[in-house]
Image (spheres, rainbow, N blue to C red):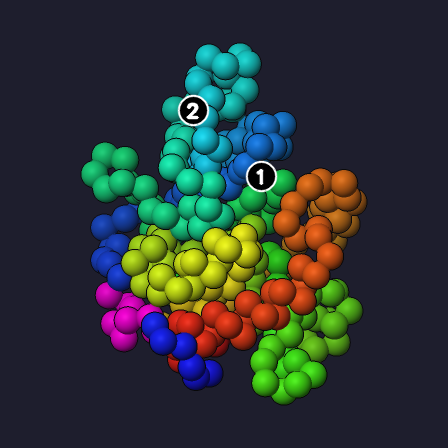
Amino acid sequence: ESGGDERAPANLRSFVGEDGHLDDRRFTVLLNTFKRRDLLKKAVAHYATCENVAEIRVVWSEQVPPPTRGEEGGAYFGPKPSMVTYDSHPTTSIQNRFDPPANGANAISTRAVFNVDDDVRMPCAALARGFRAWRANEDVLVGYYPRTHAPNDSGCGWRYVWDDFSLWRRGDFSIVLTKAAFMRTGYMSLYSEGLPQSARRYIDEYKNCEDIAMQILTAKITGKPPVYVPVPTMHYLWAKLEGFGVAGISKGSGHHVHRGECITDLSRMIGGGRV
C-alpha cells in the first residue's frame, strides 16, 4: 500500500520493549466495558475462575468514578477482589483498551494480555487452549474470531470479509478480532506510541477499527498472520444467540462496509502495513 502523509516510525519494533522479565506462565485479562454494568459483573466473575489468570484489569472509560469494592456487595470485583483493578481513562475513546497502564507498581506483570469485551465470556478450557497457542506464537495476535479481507469491486481497496460462509469457503483469514484475543503486553506501547496521529484521529472520529490498526501494526513488525483458535461449536452458537439485542457498534447498518474502508485507509496511513 502507498500514500498518506504521516507514516508509522521505521523502528516500530523498538516500541514493544523488553519483556523477558515478565511472567509468561500467566496472563492478564484486559476487560473492555462501557455502560453495560450487568455484563461487566458477569465477565469479572467468570474470568476470575479461570486458571492462569494473574489479574483482571478493567478498562474504565465511563466519565464517572469506577465502582468501589463495597458497591452492590462487591459484585464488580467478583469472587477474588484482590485480582481486579479498574484503570480509569480521561476520555471515552475506544482506543483506551490499548493504552498501557502506568509503570511501576501499577504496571502489568505478565508477558501476555487477553483483550476481551464485556459481552464475551470465553469458556475457561477454550481460554487455556488460546493461551497455549499464544505461548507457541508470542509475536502475533492469537484469537477466537477470525476475519479476512479481499479486493473490493473497484480493485483499488479492500473489503471486509466477515460472514461464516465466506470465511469457510476461502479457508484463510488475516484478522482476529481483539474482542477476544491474546497479544504481547508490549503491543500496547506499540499502539500508543507507534500509531500515527492521523490514524488515531481517524479511529476516534469513526469510533471503529482500532483492532484493524493493531492487526496492521503487528503484521508490519512480524510479517506473520494471526493465529486462530476455534471455539467449541456449542459456545459459538450460544454466543450468537446471546448477542441478539445487545447494543454495540457492530450492529449498525454499514458497519461492515466501513470496516473495508478502514483496512484500505489505515494500511495507507500506517505505511507498508497490511493485514
Please state which of residues 26 and 261 is positioned toward the viewer in this rendering: 261
Mark nearer the N terminus (2 vs 1): 2
Residue 177 coordinates in the image, percent (x, y): 56, 58
Q: Main secondary structure of the magenta part?
A: loop
Q: Are marks 2 and 1 in contact (CB under 8 Å)?
A: no
Q: Quadrant of residue 258?
A: bottom right
Residue at image point 51% right, 72% down: 265
Tell me the number on the disc at residue 118: 1
Q: Residues within 10 Å of mark 2 (few under 14, many from 20)?
A: few
Taking 144 as reference, is 9 above or below it? Answer: below
Between circles 2 and 1, the one closer to the viewer is 2
**Pointer 2: what residue?**
65
Q: Does residue 113 belong to the magenta stretch?
A: no
Q: Give the extent of the magenta segment.
A: 7-14
Vertical order, 152 against 134 (above or below):
below
Tell me the kind of residue under disc 2.
Pro
Q: Is residue 75 left or right of residue 91?
A: right
